[in-house]
Image (spheres, helix red, strand yellow):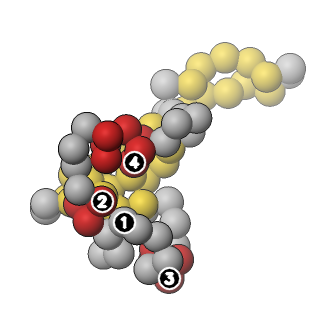
């Protein structure tokens, strides 16, 4: 979770949001520096099992990850 203040603006929200749908890992939001997808691939998860859901369905076809 991201909780705190940025000058006079309150910040609150999740840094990472991941869903498991069927046999795919859907990354809905990723506010990390390294990238959750990169960490998952390093841990042995195939790229075809990861959906970058924060990208539009049209743009997903241009990534190395799952399109669905």
- Distance between the alpha carbons at the discs numbered 4 and 3: 19 Å
Snapshot quadrant of residue 40: top left
The residue under the point 66% across, 17% down is 4
**Is tag 4's residue or tag 2's residue first in the polypeptide sequence?**
4
Label placed on residue 37: 4
- Mark 4 lies on a secondary structure that is helix
- Mark 3 lies on a secondary structure that is helix
Label placed on residue 32: none
Q: Are marks 2 and 1 in contact (CB under 8 Å)?
A: yes
Q: Are marks 4 and 2 in contact (CB under 8 Å)?
A: yes
- Distance between the alpha carbons at the discs numbered 3 and 1: 13 Å
The residue under the point 26% across, 65% down is 48
Label placed on residue 58: 3
- Mark 1 lies on a secondary structure that is loop
Label placed on residue 65: 1
Nearer to the camera, 55 or 4: 55
In the rendered image, residue 67, in percent from the top left (x then y), is placed at 35, 75
- Mark 2 lies on a secondary structure that is helix
Please tell me how crowded label 1 is: few (under 14), some (14-19), or many (20+) other residues with Cα within 10 Å. Answer: some
**Is tag 4's residue or tag 1's residue first in the polypeptide sequence?**
4
What residue did someone put label 2 on? 47
Snapshot quadrant of residue 31: top right
């Amino acid at each position: 979770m991201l909780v705190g203040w940025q000058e006079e603006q309150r910040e609150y929200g999740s840094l990472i949001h991941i869903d498991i749908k069927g046999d795919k890992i859907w990354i809905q939001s990723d506010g990390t520096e390294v990238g959750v997808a990169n960490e998952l691939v390093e841990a042995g998860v195939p790229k075809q099992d990861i959906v970058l859901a924060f990208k539009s369905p049209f743009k997903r076809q241009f990534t190395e990850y799952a399109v669905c």
